[in-house]
Amino acid sequence: MTLAIDSRSLPEAPGGVRVSAPVNHVPPAGWREVLRRYDLSLPFVLHYGPDTPARNSRLLIEAWAMTDKRVRQRIQLAVVGLNKSSGDELVNVVNRLGLAQSVRLYSALGAPSDLSALLSAADIAALPLTRCDFPHQIFQAWTTRAAVLTSDLPAIAEIAGDAALMIDPGDAGAIARGLTRLMKDGTYRRDLVDRGRRRLAQFQYQ
């Protein structure tokens, strides 16, 4: 089964969507139509951001294949913001690993407001960054009340504190274990969401 980058129902927003753009929490009534357009069902993990090697998308997908299969059958991974080159590469990875049923790949956000809706609907924001100058994405996830999995890089750990599950971004096994824990443990996810909201209040993030 070939998994295609979905560019038909999700045309690129003019100029693309800035990852540092403000987001807001959206209630379910505001994101149901967005999930329909993206062919996503609940629950799901969202992976997004600038399409650079530092986003670590390939290793995240390889880690996804290592997660508990029984859990993976009940949850999707959505990867948003791919260009043609990275999209083609990741389609091959997804198909090679037999993940076409649980992974959704998208070329771009359909509209800037979609990011708020997707993050608000997501259970987990998966951000295993290998480099980060400033973690806008973590602030966005906290704002929209998604539990955060991210890297244990010093610059990120200093800001995330105890409000994220931190893993070694170069270790697929560590990423897989982190994802599995978050997918299985709803109490821990909710605790991270609460910590994230409190942590966010300590920063002036717009």
Image (spheres, grey):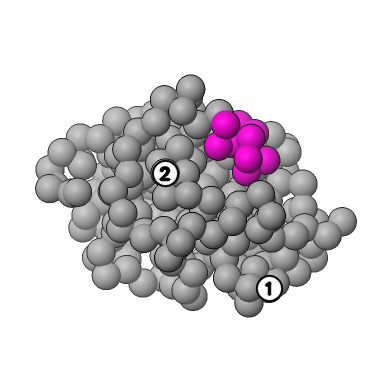
Q: Quadrant of residue 180?
A: top right
- Check residue 41 for magenta coloring: yes
Q: Nearer the viewer, mark 1 or mark 2?
A: 2
Q: Which residues are magenta?
A: 33-43
The answer to whether 90 appears left or right of 156 in the picture is right
What residue lies at 79% left-to-right and 62% top-to-bottom? 95
C-alpha gap between disc 1 and disc 2: 27 Å
Of all residues shown, which one is farthest toward the top? 29
Above or below for 23 versus 47:
above
Badge 1 or badge 2: first in the primary sequence: 1
Numbered label attached to residue 113: 2
Kindly identify the amino acid type of the residue bearing the numbered disc 2.
Answer: Ser
Q: Position of residue 142 (x, y in %)?
A: 31, 41
Kindly identify the amino acid type of the residue bearing the numbered disc 1.
Answer: Glu
Image quadrant where one finds the N terminus = bottom right
Numbered label attached to residue 89: 1
The answer to whether 105 appears left or right of 170 in the picture is right
Q: Position of residue 186 (x, y in %)?
A: 48, 28
CB atoms of marks 1 and 2 within 8 Å = no
In this rendered view, identify the residue nearer to me: 21 or 14: 14
